[in-house]
Image (cartoon, rainbow, N blue to C red):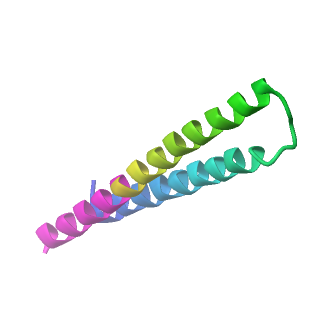
Amino acid sequence: MDGGHVRVLARVVGEAADGVRTAAERLGAARGVAWTSVAADEFRARLVTERARVLEAAEHLDAATVALLRHAAALDGAAR
């Protein structure tokens, strides 16, 4: 695998991170639904927790993207 292939993989992982962030935004929007009940309050609290976990996953994907790009640069440097 050369640097170009690794950069393509980095782009795919970065796009996955964007998709995961979009899912987190949707979870956040669901909190605005005008439900009133104990179950609704519990559901909204759960959404906060789950949204944080989804955003954490996006951050890990971002870190993987950065690592892949560094690896691609190292491969390019080694090929010279």
Does residue 7 sit above or below 43 in this rendering? below
Quarter of the image where one finds residue 47: top right
- Is residue 15 inside the magenta stretch? no
On screen, residue 76 versus residue 27, left or right, reads left
Residue at (40%, 58%) from the top-left corner?
Answer: 10
Counting labels gives 0
Q: Nearer the viewer, residue 19 or 43?
A: 43
Q: Is residue 80 above or below residue 75?
A: below
- The magenta stretch spans residue 75: yes
| Residue 45 sits above or below residue 10 on the image | above
Residue 30, percent from left and from top: 76, 44
Judging depth in this view, the residue of 79 and 13 nearest the camera is: 13
- Magenta stretch in the rendered image: 64-80
Horizontal arrangement in the rendering, residue 11 relative to residue 66 (left or right) = right
* Quarter of the figure with residue 71: bottom left
Residue displayed at 39% across by 49% down: 60
- In percent of width and height, residue 26 lies at 71, 49
| Main SS class of the magenta portion in the image | helix
